[in-house]
Amino acid sequence: MFKTVLFPIDQSREAREAADVVTNVVQKYGSRLVILSVVEEPTAEAPSADPMVSPEVVAKLLESARALFEQQGIPAEVLEKQGKPAFTICDVADEIGADLIIMGCRGLGLTEEGATDSVTTRVINLSPCPVLIVP
């Protein structure tokens, strides 16, 4: 049913908690697991890079996520992309033919407008496949 599962992660508690659900779904359906981290591109309004999302920090985050799943016998592919998180998540889901996106209900991606404009809300609205939100 869910041949390919996309798991977008950031450093939030919600992303860590969603990992348990990802494990259960991937094991139950024998799914291919792709872990994605999106680094937002610097803009004119925010030209300096956030040190919490440096390439080294993102690489470490992805590697620790891969290790977590591999300890449970789940092979995982990792991807690091640059762009607007919601759009990039949906683009990657389309590119890899994801059957399901699993993500935490509120990661680090709230915009200045608040929860109605969160990354999660945008992914739900733009996704090419079902989205499972873990509270």
Image (cartoon, rainbow, N blue to C red):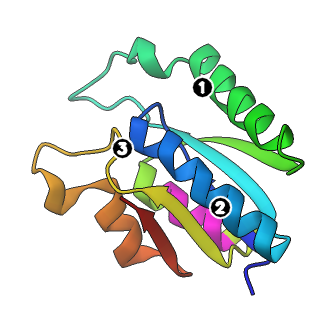
Rendered residue at 48%/22% (across/down): 53
Please state which amino acid type lies under the numbered disc 1: Val
Q: Which residue is mark 3?
A: 107
Which stretch appears magenta? 88-94
Q: Is residue 92 magenta?
A: yes
Q: Is residue 71 above or below residue 21?
A: above
Please state which amino acid type lies under the numbered disc 2: Leu
Element on which disc 2 rests: strand
Residue 44 falls left or right of residue 71 = left
- Distance, label 2 to label 1, CA atoms, is 17 Å
Q: Is residue 40 magenta?
A: no
Please state which amino acid type lies under the numbered disc 3: Gly
Residue 121 falls left or right of residue 14 = left
Packing grade of label 2 (10 A; few <14, some 14-19, many >=20) is many
Are dots 2 and 1 in contact, CB under 8 Å?
no
Count every numbered label the image shows and give the total. Answer: 3
Element on which disc 1 rests: helix
Which quarter of the image is occupied by the C terminus?
A: bottom left
Query: Toward which corner of the image does residue 69 lie, by quadrant?
Result: top right
The mark found on residue 93 in the picture is none
Element on which disc 3 rests: loop
Q: Which residue is mark 1?
A: 58
In the rendered structure, which disc, 2 or 1, sits on the residue that comes first in sequence? 2
Packing grade of label 1 (10 A; few <14, some 14-19, many >=20) is many
Q: Residue furthest bottom?
A: 1
Q: Which residue is mark 2?
A: 6
Rendered residue at 81%/48% (across/down): 77
